Image (cartoon, grey):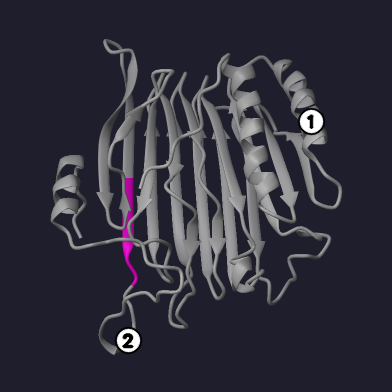
Amino acid sequence: MQALSSGQGREAAEAAPDRRPMREEEPAATGSGGYRQPVVGLLRLGFCYDAAARRTRLREQVQRPPLQVVRAFATADGGALVHVHNLSGGVLGGDLYEVEVEVGAATRVMLTSTGATRLYRAHSRDQPAEQRWRVHVGSGALLEHLPDALIPFAGARYRQQVSIALDEGAGLLWWDLLAPGRLARGECFAYDLLELTFKIVAPRGPLACERFRLEPSRRPPRALARLGPFRYCASLYVCHTGLPPQRWPALEEELMALAQELSQPGCCLWGVSRLAADGLLVRGLALESLPLSQGLPIFWRLARLRLYGRTVPLPRKIY
């Protein structure tokens, strides 16, 4: 399917049949022989700074369903807020989603999802579903990625690759929240494969390289070397290239004090560690999702205030 520009995308969406998200218990549509062909979704976003208007604008928007962006909303600090939609309601077995984001110099960009990312059960013939992010943040720019949780259903197989390049003077606030499955349906670590690869590179070299792989049937996630007694996991990367090195110990100490305040033994644990350079990693483990979903914004606000001198409201969801 040919990629659509922003105007074409709106026209096609208006003319397209109903694409409401499926209910969680609803099976994916299939073709002849009862087998659904995987899809390849594409989203390419480019942002630039409009000096005359003193605000960030979405200058490039290329999309192929089921990935879609409707528009960019202005934020209080002159930035742009974008909601990434998945018209299929979740990630289906064998699907490939490619997301490319170009955050131009001096821009402020906030990305969020419209809800949790659901990873559906894979068909026995399917390869693992994949999502690939390629992100570039220009000099003096800030990218904030604040999505909802990733929820793998029973039988899901999924790989995600995130590669982020930061120019000198670029900032990044990027969080993730991983659930063990649909606990209300009795699914806890019932998925087949979850592999998350994450990399941040700056002009002077790599800042973070991480690979997170869980195969519950082969290696129990609750082993002490993995998640231990906890079921939920959250991460927040806080980066700003080019700052004086002495800025980071003070911020690390302040975030660590917050981590100790929010931790509840036997329920939720938070920790903070320094990256190779130019940043920090905040990580949380919990038995339930609420302590992490409430804690991430608290760390985010404090880090943003210390690095940029102001906070902004969390993005509102649109549907």
Q: In front: 251, or 198?
A: 251
Residue pictured at 74% horizontal, 15% vertical: 246
Task: Identify the residue under disc 1.
Answer: 256
* Element type where label 1 sits in the image: helix
* Element type where label 2 sits in the image: helix
Q: Is residue 213 left or right of residue 315?
A: right
- Which residue in the rendered view is the most extreme toward the front? 184
Task: Identify the residue under disc 2.
Answer: 34
In primary-sequence order, the first of circles 1 and 2 is 2
Principal secondary structure, stretch drawn in magenta: strand
Labels in figure, total? 2
Q: In front: 315, or 124?
A: 315
- The amino acid on which the numbered mark 2 sits, given as a three-letter code, is Gly
Q: In front: 102, or 82?
A: 82
Residue pictured at 13% horizontal, 56% vertical: 15
Q: Position of residue 261 (x, y in %)?
A: 81, 33
Q: Position of residue 99 (x, y in %)?
A: 39, 48
Q: Quadrant of the N terminus?
A: bottom left
Give the spatial CA distance, label 1 vs label 2: 53 Å
Q: Give the magenta-colored segment's residue range.
A: 38-43
